Amino acid sequence: MKTRFLSLVLGGLFITQTALAQDGANQINYSTLAQQFVQSNQNGDANSTILPSVAIDNGFGSFIDNPASVALINDSYFTLGYLSNHAENTNTFKNVSSTIDGQLGRFSNIGLIYSAPTNRGSLVFGGGYTINNSVNRRNLLAAQNSNSTITDVFKQSSSSYNDIAFETYAIDYADVEQTQLESIFRIGFEEGNFPGIYQDVEVIQKSNVGELSLFAATEFQQNLFLGASIAVVSGSHNYSRNFFERDSENAYDGDFLFADENGQNGTDIHSILLTDEINSDILGTSIRVGGLYKVFSFLNVGASYAFANKYYITEDYYSRIRTTFDDNTFSEDDFDGDFTYEIRRPSQFNLGLAIDNLSGFTFSSSMEFIDYGSTELTLTTDPDLTFDEISVLREDEKIINNSISDSYNRVINWKVGAKYATKNGYELRSGIAYFPGKSMVFDADRSVISGGVGVPLSRDIYLDVTTQYSKWSDRSIVYEYYDNAAGQVRNESITEDISQLNVLIGLKFRF
């Protein structure tokens, strides 16, 4: 098994201890992936995704905010939903900007609500699937880099690329004694005198995580509603990177590679292509409990709690380096493997207040309390680990989890929404949500504006259409390397302006 995880974990710790002021995040370090996996950024129900449902019901997906709220549902129905996502990402790297569009569509929910007949109060059961994490992100950058090369990463002995980079001449010995490895693009030049290299990079990240849930809620006492849900969380996260470097200005015009005994007929490097693929499967559980109280006929308060739970991650990875020489020959090498680990997702506490159907108007608000710094990784669950690796990783787990605790915030997410319902069943809805950045390193606050309609197509069929728009700024570390001349760790990062438009369509079939 090629231990990619060891280089990432140890490399991540090294960077954290020596460069805490760095911006952005390295997209393939496990601390970053953990935050990606545990976030919940989508409610797959077109009705529930606008107004918060901590203190009021808004259809099938209400149980995600508070399972007690579904006790307010009077009808039994089957629901089906679809999500269309359009993402626009503007990247800036070395003062060169590029904009990329992306589009994807997927089923967002399928479920059943059953409101049981009761003499008084209510008893509601339900179950089904709903998406809660959907990512469609693409970075594209192309520019001349006069500071560093991706091959600076390869020369570090802890790098998982070290072996295949040496075999493909991306790195080589810089001294006659063969004691020091160096980037192939720095050999033959004075330290600190780097001619530069043209970099062309594409990074694609996609995730699709949802939960298969069962929930129940009842009016426990007059005006007091209690509920609970249990779910199996499953899905996938896919990361791919093509990192292409080429000598577009022929700054490297040597002949020291493959020269004959007379030092003639040699060649040099024309380009290097690094390809990475990381495919992660996610499996976990989710348990929620909640309560809702009708203070008056038109005023509700609610609270819910989602327990901390574990996600089990199974990862397959593949990396390849292909080096092309000036004489059009090439050399390539690769490695692959798999790894399993665990993530402890932080708990979440919700509070909500709603004014329900006051002259046709409904207003709802909520606060979500989440401590992202309490996210924890367990790296010693892989059965293929040796005893020595487990011993090292036990100590590293403590260090990296302390780093997460020091790097991520306790946040309070705010959501407010309103709707107007006509007497014949039509609804107009609007809402806004504010999500403070969870990183202490870089501010990436995000707001989501939502609007939608509910349309009765017939007595038993109801249509929900919702649009959501969000825009925020972010940064991503492309790679981290050790600068020998400066004697410190540096990184190459990109700034990002991201906008996303989601359209959710849902159908309810009453029975």
Image (tube, rainbow, N blue to C red):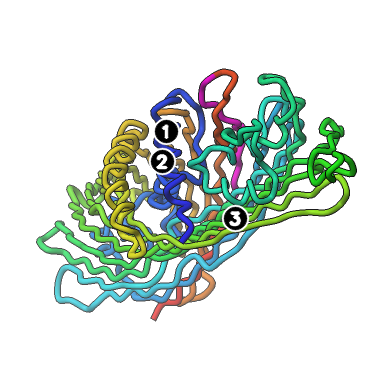
- Residue 60: x and y in percent read 37, 65
Please identify the quadrant where the C terminus is shown.
Answer: bottom left
Decide whether residue 490 is among the magenta residues.
yes
Residue identified by numbered label 1? 14
Magenta portion: prevailing SS class: strand
Question: Residue 38 versus residue 130: which sits nearer the camera?
Answer: 38
Q: Is residue 217 left or right of residue 210?
A: left
Q: How many marks?
A: 3
Decide whether residue 74 is among the magenta residues.
no
Circles 2 and 1 in contact, beta carbons < 8 Å: yes
Question: Residue 399 versus residue 102: which sits nearer the camera?
Answer: 399
Identify the amino acid type marked 3: Ser
Q: Is residue 272 left or right of residue 401?
A: right
Q: Earlier in the sequence, mark 1 or mark 3?
A: 1
Q: Quadrant of residue 177?
A: top right
Q: For numbered disc 3, what is the local secondary structure? A: strand
Q: Quadrant of residue 182?
A: top right
Disc 3: CA contacts within 10 A as few (<14), some (14-19) or many (>=20): many
Identify the amino acid type marked 2: Leu
Q: Earlier in the sequence, mark 2 or mark 3?
A: 2
- The circle drawn on residue 10 is 2
